[in-house]
Amino acid sequence: GESVGLHLPTLSVQEGDNSIINCAYSNSASDYFIWYKQESGKGPQFIIDIRSNMDKRQGQRVTVLLNKTVKHLSLQIAATQPGDSAVYFCAENSGGYQKVTFGTGTKLQVIP
Amino acid sequence: NAGVMQNPRHLVRRRGQEARLRCSPMKGHSHVYWYRQLPEEGLKFMVYLQKENIIDESGMPKERFSAEFPKEGPSILRIQQVVRGDSAAYFCASSQIQVLSSYEQYFGPGTRLTVT
């Protein structure tokens, strides 16, 4: 079936550098995308979302880019901090209501 | 405003026993979702409920699993006759209906079920 997946399972970055986490999706009907952060032992935490009529959205230190042509989504974290260490999930919605489908996840490790 | 609450946080059951997982949504939220997460994997949708109604249970195993969200009280995910393969983290999320807005779901801390 349709799925959302990630290119890199683990990403290590130096503190202060920028991080880019990628996600590929296969459901062309998806019209809404979300990035979640999950710290060890905790539930996912909403970071940022983007609708399919946009190709970029910025938040505080984070930017989400959407390329519908190649069905690719990325999360950019500026000036990565140790507190950013977590697993990041992209998720997509195409159900017309609030059901989302999660990707596998990328573990971000920040090196002090 | 308290967040989504789940209890217990950790639950150990022997094979064949029943597991009951509880979720209290955020105040004012009338939509509840249950997800299951295996180690090193993403969250898999199980069921979506509104008060007294199951809206979508397409991710729920056909047997042994059931969910409810009564008019009063928390949402309950019930697993009968648990097997080792049921061992996972179960997350609950809640949201409000917001037209033309984000589908932001607020997640609870999860219940980690271990079947021995």
Image (cartoon, rainbow, N blue to C red):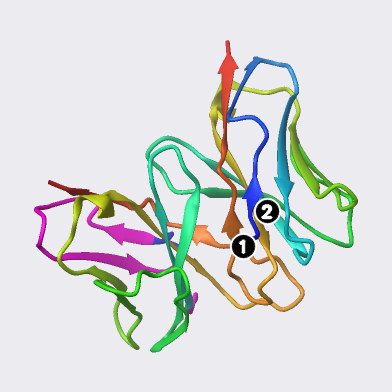
Q: Distance between the residues labelled 2 and 1?
A: 8 Å
**Crowding near pointer 1: few (<14 within 10 Å), some, many (20+)?**
many
Residue A67 falls within the magenta-colored stretch: no
**Disc sitting over residue B61 in the figure:** none
Residue B27 falls within the magenta-colored stretch: yes
* Identity of the residue drawn at 65% across and 60% down: A2
* Identity of the residue drawn at 35% across and 88% down: B71
Residues beneath discs 2 and 1 located on the same chain: no
To which residue does mark 2 refer? A34
SS for tag 1?
Answer: loop
* Identity of the residue drawn at 18% across and 60% down: B82
Mark 2 touching mark 1, by CB under 8 A?
Answer: yes
| Outermost residue toward the front in this view | A1
- Residue A3 position, x and y percent, is 63, 55
To which residue does mark 1 refer? B104
The numbered mark 1 sits on a residue in which chain? Answer: B
Q: Quadrant of residue B18?
A: bottom left
- Residue A17 position, x and y percent, is 73, 17
**What amino acid does circle 2 point to?**
Ile
Magenta stretch: give its range.
B5-30
From the viewer's side, name the closer residue of A83 and A110: A110
**Crowding near pointer 2: few (<14 within 10 Å), some, many (20+)?**
many
